Amino acid sequence: MSFTTSTALASKLPQAKDLSHLFVPTFRIHQKSPFKAVMGTPTLDMINMAGGVPHPSTFPLEQVQATVRAPSHAAPGRTGTLSLERTQANGSTESLNELLQYNDGRGMASYCRFLRQFTEQAHAPPYADWDVVASCGNTDSIAKAVSLFCQQGDHIIVEQYSFPGALSNLVFAKVKPVPVAMDIEGVDPVALDSLCSSWTGATPLRAIYVIPTGQNPTGATMSLARRKALYAVAQKHDLVIIEDDPYYFLQLGPMPETQDTTATDMNKLSLVPSLLSLDTDGRVIRLDSFSKILAPNLRCGWITAPAYIQDRMQILNESTILQPSGLTQGVISRLLNDTWGIEGWIEHLNALRAAYAARRNLFVTLARKHLAGLATFTVPTAGMFLWMRVDLGDAATDATAMPRLLDAMKKGGVMMAPDMPFRVANAAAAAAPERYLRAAFALAETD
């Protein structure tokens, strides 16, 4: 995987279409916090007596320092030092005093600057007025994206099997999920078109939530043709696409036919283009996270969307989290801007993909050997999950069969996730027997 900067000038690209008619009424009028609308965001050189801002001399952290390994996982002995100083800028990154102080809901400037550069290289959004906003990871981002377009009693389209964190968000928001059929490539665009065309709900369908790469739980990855077809249906029915894509940079390629499980050169394996990269209208809200590509409890990610949508995201951040931890943003900024740089970051992603490809390959090899006749599956080309259809034989209609299987597995020291928490409830799903298990191969050891 390698990226080249787009040669297209932003000034030559079109502006995003205004889809604000799809907002819930609360967000159709852009309203900043009354206090911030008047005061703006203070800077360190101001004599700031307007807000309840603590004096930076009271912050106990004088310096933050970490030992960082080289971006290539194949060179564990190579390390470097990352440091953040209290009062002076740290390369491209703000001082500790700035990182530890209140800021606005967009995110720290250096953190967002890197993510704009990376987003441009990785996706080259085909409209001019896009921007990034810092997030606390994708579960937080999902809730905010949904709240822009759905309110209590509304419906949103989701894949028939989906991320439980997203489904829980919908429960709390009292927004009803409408499942759309899937196949081995994810959402079936024909089924999506039929669903939208025949919709008779009290309120219109405004958005679809999808995980297009290494889908959780099924492991499905949409081809480029499938993504284009999905986007065309969204245009036809005026849907916003919430593209939840934490596994995008974990595209692993096909399973090699030889026993050499490290044969794939990740530098030469191109990525399937994102929905964002196809978004000529500005109808994709893309959610990215560092959880799977750096570490989960950094609780940092980013949202990419048209600027007028990001204005609302800023309001949502400032009324909830304010922004992710400034210290965490500072560590990530220092790592990516100054310690590794963009080339080192891409090297890290390629090393990560190679490591997970090796785990996938071993896991699939063992599953084929030991589960033949018991389970069937499609080899995933991205992500962390193997979605296995279990042959329960004569017990397929026995409601206790899957719980008994899971109990037996636990007693044997093995845990997998049944399909029930991932299924979107409807009459057809409720009547179907539980026949799937999700196995995460990310923790599989290759020794």
Image (cartoon, rainbow, N blue to C red):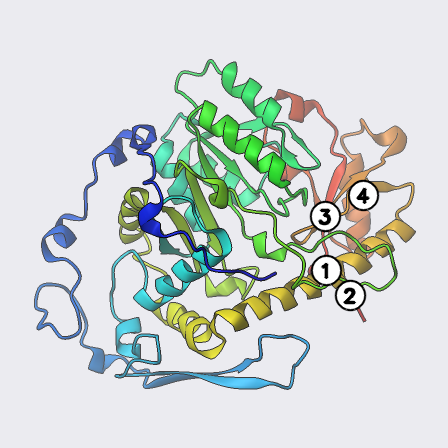
Q: Quadrant of the C terminus?
A: bottom right
The quadrant where residue 430 appears: top right
C-alpha span from label 3 to label 1: 10 Å
Q: Quadrant of the N terminus?
A: bottom right
C-alpha span from label 3 to label 4: 24 Å
Residue 328, labelled with which disc? none
C-alpha span from label 2 to label 1: 8 Å
Percent coordinates x, y for residue 358 in the rendering? 76, 63
What residue sits right under mark 2 in the picture? 262
Mark 1 closeness class: few <14, some 14–19, many ≥20 residues within 10 Å: many
What residue sits right under mark 4 in the picture? 405
* Dot 4: element: helix
Q: Are marks 3 and 2 in contact (CB under 8 Å)?
A: no
First in sequence: mark 3 or mark 2?
2
Mark 4 closeness class: few <14, some 14–19, many ≥20 residues within 10 Å: few
Mark 2 closeness class: few <14, some 14–19, many ≥20 residues within 10 Å: some
What residue sits right under mark 3 in the picture? 380
* Mark 1 vs mark 4: in front: 1
Q: Are marks 2 and 1 in contact (CB under 8 Å)?
A: yes
- 225 horizontally vs 362: left or right: left
- 353 horizontally vs 97: left or right: right
C-alpha span from label 3 to label 2: 16 Å
The amino acid type of the residue labelled 3 equals Pro
Residue at (54% x, 73% y) in the render? 344
The relative height of residue 345 versus residue 188 in the rendered view (above or below) is below
The answer, for residue 183, to whether it is visible in the render is: yes
First in sequence: mark 1 or mark 4?
1
The amino acid type of the residue labelled 4 equals Leu
* Dot 2: element: loop
Residue at (25% x, 63% y) in the render? 103
What residue sits right under mark 1 in the picture? 357
